[in-house]
Image (cartoon, rainbow, N blue to C red):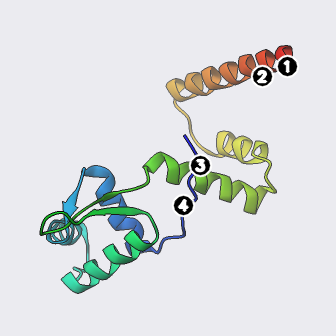
Amino acid sequence: MAKKNVPELGPLEFKLLRIFWKHDSLTAPQVLEEHNRQAKKPAAYTTIMTLLGRLTDKGVLKVNRERQPYRFSAAITREQMLRQRVRDFISLFFEGQPLDLVVRLVEETPLSEESVEKLEDVLRERKSKSRLMAKSK
């Protein structure tokens, strides 16, 4: 999968995107209803429409204009967003070197036995891939 550059999002834009990750596609009234159901401060329909337009312009949402009301859907996945934000964070705070972040997370975060086992599995798999790549060179 090609890396898609994910634009910066404001807090409300991000909240709307999270709504779309839970649904295939929604109309603006459905987005308004879903947002206001979870929000401490309800948004106006015009605010939601403005935000949907911005998110579409940024390439974060797709819009189907074949029928009224228009249907919006996410153009980026949660995984794409997470990958880029982690890369950006590592670049900004750790000069592109993830080891310090990983060590800090392991040391500072309580991990269940299951989590430790998963981490060990990931590290074993990564080590195995590294060995295969080294052999193929």
Question: What amino acid type is highlighted by mark number 4?
Answer: Val
Q: In this orientation, which residue lies closer to the viewer: 70 or 20?
A: 70
Three-letter residue code for mark 1: Ala
Residue highlighted by disc 1: 134
Q: Tags 1 and 3 in contact by the CB under 8 Å rule?
A: no
Reading the image, the residue beneath label 3 is 3
Give the residue furthest to the front.
66
User: Mark 2 is on which residue type?
Assistant: Ser
In this view, the residue in front, 137 or 41, is: 137
Q: Earlier in the sequence, mark 4 or mark 1?
A: 4
**Residue drawn where x is 54% and y is 67% of the image:** 7
Where residue 6 is drawn, which disc sits there?
4
Residue at image location 37% in from the left, 63% down from the top? 61
Say whether residue 72 is left or right of residue 102.
left
Residue 130 is marked as 2
Q: Which amino acid lies under the numbered mark 3 shown in the image of this protein? A: Lys
Quick check: can you spot residue 44? Answer: no
Which residue reaches farthest left? 68
Q: How packed is label 4: few (under 14 Cα within 10 Å), some, or many (20 or more)?
A: some
Q: Is residue 130 left or right of residue 117?
A: right
Residue 19 tag number: none
Residue 103, by quadrant, is top right
Which residue does the image show at 70% across and 42% down from the upper left?
102
Whole-percent x, y for residue 66 in the image: 18, 63
Quadrant of the frame with the N terminus: top right
Outermost residue toward the right?
137
Give the number of the mark in front: 2 or 4. 4
Rendering quarter of residue 26: bottom left
Q: Residue at x 64, y 22 (%)?
A: 120
